[in-house]
Each structure stands twice: as C-alpha cells, then as structure tokens.
Image (spheres, rainbow, N blue to C red):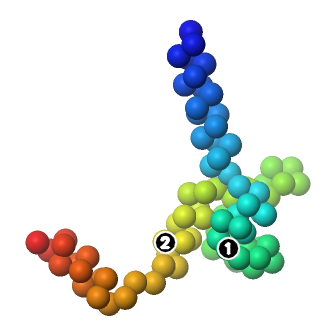
Amino acid sequence: MTRFWEDRKDRVMEVEVALKTRQEAAAYLRVGIRKLDMIAADGTIPRVKIGKRTLFKVVDLNDYIRAHTETSQEDADAVAARIMS
C-alpha cells in the first residue's frame, strides 16, 4: 500500500513541476514577462490556459531553448564527425 501512494505522489509532483506560471517561465528563460508574452502571442511557445491562469509546459520551454541555441561551426563539425565515425 505504501508503495502505491509513493508512486502516485511522485507522479503528481512531476505534473506540478511540468507546468510553470508566466513569472516562472520568464525566469526560466531569463527574459521579462512582456518578452515571454510576445513570444507566446506569436505561437512560438504554446500556452496552457486554465481559467484566467496562463501556464507553460517545461517541455515547450526546453524546446524553445534548443531551437534558439547557437553552436559554433567547430561544435557542429565535431558533432558531425562523431556521428560519421
């Protein structure tokens, strides 16, 4: 019985952490709330609306970071070399 509740508690905590408020999402991206709102308004980062609350999935925030991460040509060449070998 205890194991069931421990497993369930962990899953609930994962769901809670998977969503961030506007303030938390802006801090996570290290941008202002207005900038986050502009990014979300054009659909670049999907929003979750629950009543009046606007939330953001951590997965979507991480995808945004990955999509906007710049790599140097040396880094790209090194990755390509590892893939090809």
**What is the total number of numbered labels drawn onto the structure image?**
2
Q: Secondary structure at mark 2?
A: helix
Amino acid type at image mark 2: Arg
Q: Quick check: 21 left or right of 63? A: right
Q: Position of residue 65 (x, y in %)?
A: 54, 72
Whether residue 32 is visible to the viewer of this picture, yes or no, is: yes
Residue 30 image label: 1
User: Quick check: 48 above or below 40?
Assistant: above
Residue 66 image label: 2
Q: Position of residue 28 (x, y in %)?
A: 66, 65
Which quadrant of the structure image shows residue 8? top right
For the point 52% across and 79% down, the residue is 68
Whether residue 47 is visible to the viewer of this picture, yes or no, is: no
Amino acid type at image mark 1: Arg
For the point 64% across and 37% down, the residue is 13
For the point 84% across and 54% down, the residue is 53
State the quadrant of the C terminus: bottom left
Q: Quick check: 68 left or right of 55? A: left
Q: Position of residue 38 (x, y in %)?
A: 75, 78
Task: Give the CA distance from mark 1 to mark 2.
Answer: 14 Å
Q: Secondary structure at mark 1?
A: loop
User: Quick check: 50 above or below 36?
Assistant: above
User: Quick check: 40 above or below 7?
Assistant: below
The earlier-in-sequence mark between 1 and 2 is: 1
Q: Quick check: 70 left or right of 32? A: left
Which quadrant of the structure image shows residue 71? bottom left
User: Quick check: 29 above or below 73?
Assistant: above
Tell which residue pokes out farthest to the right in this image. Answer: 52
